[in-house]
Amino acid sequence: MTGAKSIRVLTVADRAVMRLGMQTALRGQAGIEVVGEAASVAEAAQILETSGADVALVALCNPLAIDLSPFRAEQRKGRDCRVILIAPHTDPDTMVHLVMGIRGAVGYLIEDVEPEALIEAVRSVHAGGSPMDSQVASFVAGYLRHRSVTAADAPLALTIDELEILKRIVHGQTNREIGEFLALEDSVVKSRVSRILRKVGAKNRAAAAAWWARYAQAVEAQEQA
């Protein structure tokens, strides 16, 4: 689109080859600009002050040690940079920890992500989405499936309208897409999404989608019992 503002991306990885790989995939893409690179989250937080990055791709060798609090601190200052975590191929428990235990990320990928999928994730996150690699989603769903759950886990306070919005979050729709379908202003959708996250105890849209998968599995199990 003529005159459209580019999505500014910051790459964060403790391996130079990983930073180079991400930058190679992104450079030359229409509407995307790589504005910086960092070897750690702490270094990235310093770069944020001058880069004005919209999206950060964070890929660290030890995902269990990731601390995104510097990003959250920058967000409180008005520098809202949305984070996509990129995990190495690792065990399911680590993947679950990324989604359920690390605050501050809105997207989740694994290292062998295809360049096209990486680019799509950047665009999705910038538009308000929460992309999750299918393998990560499978691990999370498996974890939730094997927990002891019942349909009573569903917050009864969720309204029919909120359930409809939650289902659309699960399908990866952005606030704007949800608003267009339901004829709601963006601000109204944003407010309702925040309320839904509080009700289901989710820290972000991806965790809410994981909660819905858990709930749907529990209901299905009860119906088949």
Image (spheres, rainbow, N blue to C red):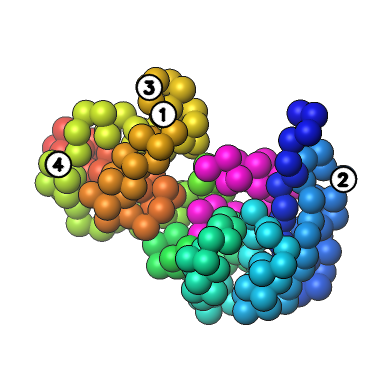
Q: Considering the numbered disc 3 on the image, is that residue within a helix, a strand or a loop?
A: helix
- Residue at screen point 59% across, 77% down: 62
- Characterize the local packing of mark 4: few (<14), some (14-19) or many (20 or more) Cα atoms within 10 angstroms: few
Quadrant of residue 140 within the rendered picture = bottom left
> How far separated are the C-alphas under marks 1 and 3?
9 Å
Badge nearest the viewer, 4 or 3:
3
- Characterize the local packing of mark 1: few (<14), some (14-19) or many (20 or more) Cα atoms within 10 angstroms: few
> How far separated are the C-alphas under marks 3 and 2?
36 Å
Q: Which mark is residue 185?
A: 1
Q: Amino acid at mark 4?
A: Ala
Q: Amino acid at mark 2?
A: Gly
Q: Position of residue 125 (x, y in %)?
A: 58, 46
Q: Please report whichever mark, 4 or 1, sits nearer to the chain's N-terminal start.
A: 4
Q: In the rendered image of this protein, does residue 168 appear above or below residue 5?
A: above
- Residue contact between numbered discs 4 and 3, judged by CB atoms under 8 Å: no
Badge nearest the viewer, 4 or 1:
1
Looking at the image, residue 35 sits to the left or right of residue 183; the answer is: right
- Residue at screen point 45% across, 60% down: 99
Residue 160 magenta: no
Q: Nearer the viewer, residue 152 or 195?
A: 195
Q: Considering the numbered disc 2 on the image, is that residue within a helix, a strand or a loop?
A: loop
- Residue contact between numbered discs 1 and 3, judged by CB atoms under 8 Å: no
Badge nearest the viewer, 3 or 2:
3
Q: Amino acid at mark 3?
A: Leu
Q: Considering the numbered disc 1 on the image, is that residue within a helix, a strand or a loop?
A: loop
> How far separated are the C-alphas under marks 4 and 2?
47 Å
Q: Please report whichever mark, 4 or 3, sits nearer to the chain's N-terminal start.
A: 4
Q: Which mark is residue 28?
A: 2
- Residue contact between numbered discs 3 and 2, judged by CB atoms under 8 Å: no
Q: Position of residue 23 (x, y in %)?
A: 81, 58
